Image (spheres, rainbow, N blue to C red):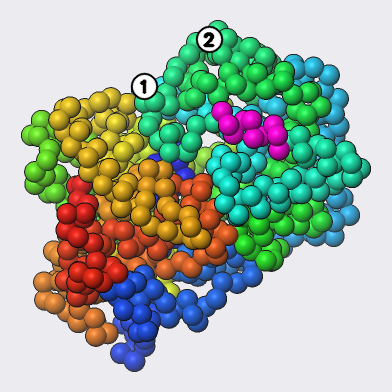
Amino acid sequence: MKKKLPYLIAAALVAVIAACNGQSKSPATEPDALAANIDSTVRPQDDFFMFANGKWFKQHPIPASEKQNGLWEMIQDTINDQILNLCQASAKITKRPYGSPRQKIGDFYYSAMDSATLNRKGISDLKPDLDSIDSIKDWQGLAREAAYIYTVSGAPFFYFDVQQDDKISSKMSVYINQGGLSLPNRSYYFDMDARAVMVRQKFVEYAGNMFKVMGYDDEHARQAATNLMKLETEIARTSRKREDTRDPLKNYTKVTYANLCSLAPNFDWQLFFKGVGLSNIDSVVVAQPEFLTALSGYLTSYTLLDWKNYLKLHYIRGLVSYMDDKTYMEAFDFYGKVLSGVTEPKPRWKRAVEETDNSLGELIGQVYVTDYLPKGTKEKLQQIGNDIKEVYAERIQKLDWMSPATKKKALNKLNLMIMKVGYPDKWKDLTSLKVGRGSYVENVMSANRWAFNYAMAKYGKPVDRTEWDMEPQTYNAYYNPANNEIVVPGCNIIIPGYEHKFADDALLYSVIGATFGHEMTHGFDDQGSQYDENGNLNNWWTPSDSAKFHDKTKMIIDQFNEYVAVDSLHINGTMTQGENIADLGGTMFAYEAFKKTAQFKTNQIIAGLNPNQRFFLGYAYAWMINMRPEALANQVRSNEHSPAKFRVIGPVTDMPEFFTTFNVKPGDKMWRPENLRVTIW
């Protein structure tokens, strides 16, 4: 969903490369990617995920600079190499019109690679802003400086945006959500397991070290870090749990500007809105009103000095990755090593490429489409999406738990669902974005400022339903409930093991078909099901159908609550239910679509694997991700996506075809009793 962490699909466009490029088949002696990864020491009945991927994991340990390794990393490495070529070529061009895409890309990348200048400067480029925070004399100054930080660095206090109104999708509204924490989720501040306690201790050390970088002596740095931890713990205490933010109706309260000022009277909203470039605010959607009221109280219960230290840390945290090596490593030691288990940073060139793409993705995308995207990608993606949409409609019509009246509305919503695939027909205008070679951090701040101002400029204007929130070179996809649309970028499609031959339909549908099905299902998960066909929060269910639907979602919550991901940490079935529902629907729809292909109907054997085996192994291949324990723990606590292993074994153990294919019987570890198997759509 839009406004949520997107559904990552680094492998999602896998099989299109052969179809788009029209490559000939490879010699029969070339290893098959699915068969080659099978770990024969593991029974599929015991651990299907490791059976399908274990051999690859053994042969490819996680690099020291990464939190995980797998298919996504292989594909991303290829994309990084391609963007690197573009960046290096652009940086070498001597006669580039100032303001041209090549000039901006080349200069941005050059500034990121200029380590000598970065290390000579230290944090001097940030000193004027830090001095400005130091000069705050009152609460008005606090609001003014906070507004500036939103424009160039990050989001202290709360999350703030202009986006489509959930109840009036044709209107752009101001949104305020709880936030203001340095740790990934509120649970880190209160969980008492050994890992969480260690993270809190390490965070205080990190904060103290960052204050030292800013010039504090040891004692003042220690005291500032200790007080900041107390302050953020209070903010966390009055934040809703992540799972309690999933219901869009319960997290939607529209208030007038006057009522907003009453909710948080100690915050100067007039100065804040002026600072972020907004005027004539008539109303604001406040997701968690009690959070703002509590925050207003903390503004006076903690000293102005505490709040200035808080702003400094949040300001520098958003920019620390673009500073000198010493400052960068202070943050990496905590956010990289402690939270993700990564032992060394990525090489500078890779960090430079990824940030150039992150900041100038729209410009890179325009070049990328021309130089790398195979012709026919849009058409192929559209075809696969239509196949999945057809299956989804068939399954809705056959539901035994949904009334005819609700079926009619569900089919109408599905029929009107827009599919944006490949790349946008028009690009954002980045003419006003200035980039030079002098300062890497100033280039990032300039890009941040452009993106923030672009969002603020939408207020009071008609909704642009043609807009994309991703670039064509991004392996990602999302469902936007306000537009009732799915978006699947069509970046250069490379699949390890299938560069020189056609990918078969089993892989085509188990990977990209499942992705389309996943995103479509988001329109009908625990959140998306509350939006009508026009993208408005509107209950279109009969009471009886709604009760039956929630009974089924309760089953998938219970299923994922059972899984232990790392240490003693169970997956949070409530927090992850939307993504789990989407994974289940996507896999089932993809299998039904695959059954209509010639490969399935003729029982074609490839590399000794029959169509059913290839389909399920292909789905496991799409999620071939090996993750460090620290990163797993972080994901379980703070992310609505289940870890990769459970995104595989969860859906397949709800499908009877899986048990038949791999001869899974009662007593096997992968066995799930029929009465506990979840089928929603």
CA distance separating discs 1 and 2 = 20 Å
**In the image, 652: left or right of 433?**
left
Q: Is residue 58 above or below residue 321?
A: below
Instruction: Tell me, for residue 259, which label it has, or none.
Output: 2
Q: Main secondary structure of the magenta part?
A: helix
Residue 439 appears left or right of 270: right
Quadrant showing the N terminus: top left
- Mark in the foreground, 1 or 2: 2
- Which residue is depicted at the point 45% across and 78% down? 56
Span shown in magenta: 229-238
Q: Looking at the image, can residue 547 be seen?
A: yes
| 564 or 152: nearer the viewer | 564
Q: Is residue 574 above or below residue 464?
A: below
Where residue 585 appears, as percent x and y from the top left, is: 25, 51
Q: Which mark is residue 168?
A: 1
Which residue is at a point 24% across and 85% down the rendered structure image?
608
Question: Is residue 475 visible from the viewing direction of this image?
Answer: no
Rendering coords of residue 356 (x, y %) = 63, 53
Say the numbered circle drawn on residue 538.
none
* Nearer-N-terminus badge (1/2): 1
